[in-house]
Amino acid sequence: MRILPGGAEAPQFVHDAISSTCPECWLEGCGPLDSCFGATADALECLSPFAESFAAAIWCCGSPIAFPLIYCFDSDPHTNETSGWAISMQQAPAREPLMCCFSMVCLPCGQYFVRRRALGGDMTQYRLWQGYHDGPQCCARRCEGAPITIRSGSYREQDCPNAFLCLEVTFLGGLCSSCCAFDVSRRLMKEERDLGTDPTEARQEKCVDFAGGIASSISQWACCLQVTSCCVGCCAPDGEGAQECSAEGRRASRACWSIARTLYKGMWAIKIIAIGCMSAQMTQEDEHGKQIPLKTAPDSMKMERENDISYHQY
């Protein structure tokens, strides 16, 4: 019976498939390629400890301690201290500590109350995601008629807006339901009250985007290493160099996955803290900010909401 990488015994169908697919030279030790695999294993053996040490060294980047890293990024040039908000995002936790903590500890419940604040308590104005996600989603973007196409206002939300809002912040957006609901509330309040992007908010977005790009690239490398090492180990069970290369490849893959997981956890921690601060800021804005009537944008300009552009009428 063939032994898979990691020591597990492979089922008979795996043995048959490999025997019928892989060339005989592979099954007998890869011939001249075995020395190449050995050299690759040596290179990976040198790199893997550095990757493992780096993964252990950046543990703080996977915790709330990572939040100050957002100040390594510049705010957008068009932002100012408050960008029109009653208080800045940095002042919000001190002004509304309960709302800030509540939104971080219980994200769905916090976003339920934030949306009500954004609507001024008037739930008759509620629509599913306030219409920001109307149109084809998922498979419907590629194939007309496939699920899902969202049409807010057509689901009789006005009959039971509180129930629909509960579903929106907990379920309808999948694992990101609460974050999606927050983004809608934030955009709604910005447009209604002609507010800009807070400097700290801009820094947070740049930090998350930067870390997300790195984590995505490292995850792809980890996946490639994992698949390649598995294939080499299965197809060349008798090659000493191939087996060593397979083992070192799996070790390097584990180190890459560890780095990526740390970065993803750090992104999540930064996002949650930022949501708590911005929720507190929005609560202060509802209580003490300048009240501006809801603007009605022309139909030709509604799609521009996707780019978060504010329109001014003179």
Image (cartoon, rainbow, N blue to C red):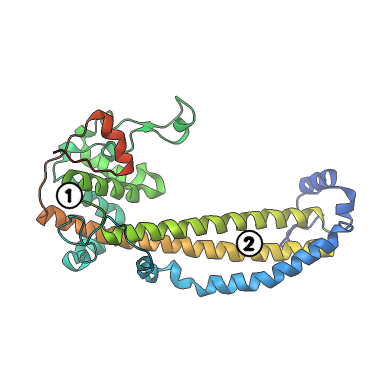
Which element carries disc 1, helix, strand or loop? Answer: helix
Q: Which residue is mark 2?
A: 253
Give the quarter of the image for residue 254.
bottom right
Q: Residue at x 41, y 68 (%)?
A: 63
**Which of the two residues, 103 or 48, is positioned nearer the viewer here?**
48
Residue 145 horizontal/vertical position (percent): 44, 24
Quadrant (top left, top right, bottom left, bottom right) of the C terminus: top left
Q: Which mark is residue 117?
A: 1
Label 1: how many residues lie within 10 Å, few (<14), some (14-19) or many (20+)? many
Q: Residue at x 82, y 58 (%)?
A: 237
Q: Disc 1 and disc 2: Cα gap in Å?
A: 46 Å
Callout 2 amino acid: Ser
In the picture, measured across the screen, residue 212 lies left or right of residue 102, that is right
Q: Residue at x 82, y 44 (%)?
A: 21
Quadrant (top left, top right, bottom left, bottom right) of the N terminus: bottom right
Which element carries disc 2, helix, strand or loop? Answer: helix
Specify which label sits upstream in the sequence, 1 or 2: 1
In the picture, measured across the screen, residue 38 lies left or right of residue 307, that is right
User: In the displayed structure, would residue 206 be above or below residue 183?
Assistant: below
Residue 310 horizontal/vertical position (percent): 24, 43
**Which of the two residues, 150 or 80, is positioned nearer the viewer here?**
80
Looking at the image, can residue 244 be seen? no
Residue found farthest to the top? 145
Label 2: how many residues lie within 10 Å, few (<14), some (14-19) or many (20+)? many
Residue 69 horizontal/vertical position (percent): 38, 68
Are the two marked residues, 1 and 2, in contact with CB atoms closer than 8 angstroms? no
Residue 225 horizontal/vertical position (percent): 66, 57
User: In the displayed structure, would residue 259 be above or below residue 10?
Assistant: below
Q: Which mark is residue 200?
A: none
Q: Residue at x 71, y 70 (%)?
A: 45
Give the quarter of the image for residue 97.
bottom left
